[in-house]
Image (cartoon, grey):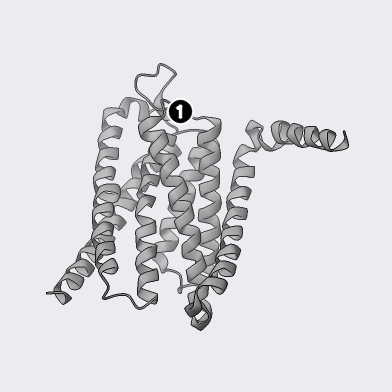
Amino acid sequence: MEIRSYQNQAESLLKDYILSDPFIPYTSIVGGIFACKMVYDLTQLFSALHFKSYSSFSRIQRVEWSNRAISTIHAIFITVMSLYFVFWSDLFSDDRLAGLITFRSSFLSTFTLGVSVGYFLADLGMIIWFYPSLGGMEYVLHHLLSVAAIAYAMLTGEGQLYTYMVLISETTTPGINLRWYLDIAGMKRSKAYLINGVVIFLAWLVARILLFTYLFYHVHLHYDQVKQLHTCGQVLVFVVPVVLSIMNLMWFAKIIRGLKKTLAKRQ
């Protein structure tokens, strides 16, 4: 009976406090940060037990090894959720007569954005703490823009559709992290490394170039709804994707140059 009583109390606490609307953003952010810490520690433990070369890595290499595991898990999670909300869920469907798409949100969509904010805050903290070992100023800028845009959409419920469109670009992250793992494992001349480069090129083209083009087209089609956002929301919808697009094009140019070098070495 006592166990059942404690269970009922826990369920009541979860329903009335942790998952109540006012607390969803904050509990999801804390949950996202906690998940990052858990993945980091588990990666270190698993790697030490199952990868012989792990013990020979430098301290910063071990940190980056675990840091990339976090970003990979987050990328898989947010990509799946973003694809669901943008293409499969009827939450942002034009056929749904439930208000403007720019003001639609749900418990799940808000919670998911909170988890992502938690990740970006945790990752930004690591980047700054180990600066510039885990990334230069462009990564700091990228994460600050991401946190601002995602947090605003999470807290206000505005523009969540476009936030999820941008977050689909995280689908390129696992391939980039795998490339680093192959590099540090001394497999730059392997077939897997070459295939990985081609996959990154294609994924980047689709998720960070073509998809952003579709985003701008969608904004154009729904401009009458977008202009009803608050000023801050309009700035984030127009400015953040443009800045990220410029950065994506710059990184895409580097990917093309790297792929050319890899292919040239194999001829």
Residue lying farthest right? 2
Choose between 22 and 82: the one closer to the eye. 82
Looking at the rendering, which quadrant does residue 49 occupy?
bottom right
Looking at the rendering, which quadrant does residue 249 occupy?
bottom left
Write the residue at 34% across / 52% down: 244
Write the residue at 47% across / 58% down: 71
User: x%, y% of residue 215?
Assistant: 30, 39
**Would residue 234 be seen by someone viewing this image from the given angle?**
no
For this view, does 98 lie left or right of residue 12? left
User: x%, y% of residue 69?
Assistant: 48, 62
For this view, does 134 lie left or right of residue 115? left
Write the residue at 50% across / 78% down: 52
Q: Secondary structure at mark 1?
A: helix
**Quadrant placement of the N terminus:** top right
Write the residue at 55% across / 58% down: 122
Residue lying farthest top? 97
**Quadrant placement of the C terminus:** bottom left
Q: Which residue is mark 1?
A: 103
Choose between 247 and 176: the one closer to the eye. 176
**Would residue 165 be seen by someone viewing this image from the given angle?**
yes
User: x%, y% of residue 68?
Assistant: 46, 64
37 versus 184 height, above or below: above
Choose between 172 and 156: the one closer to the eye. 172
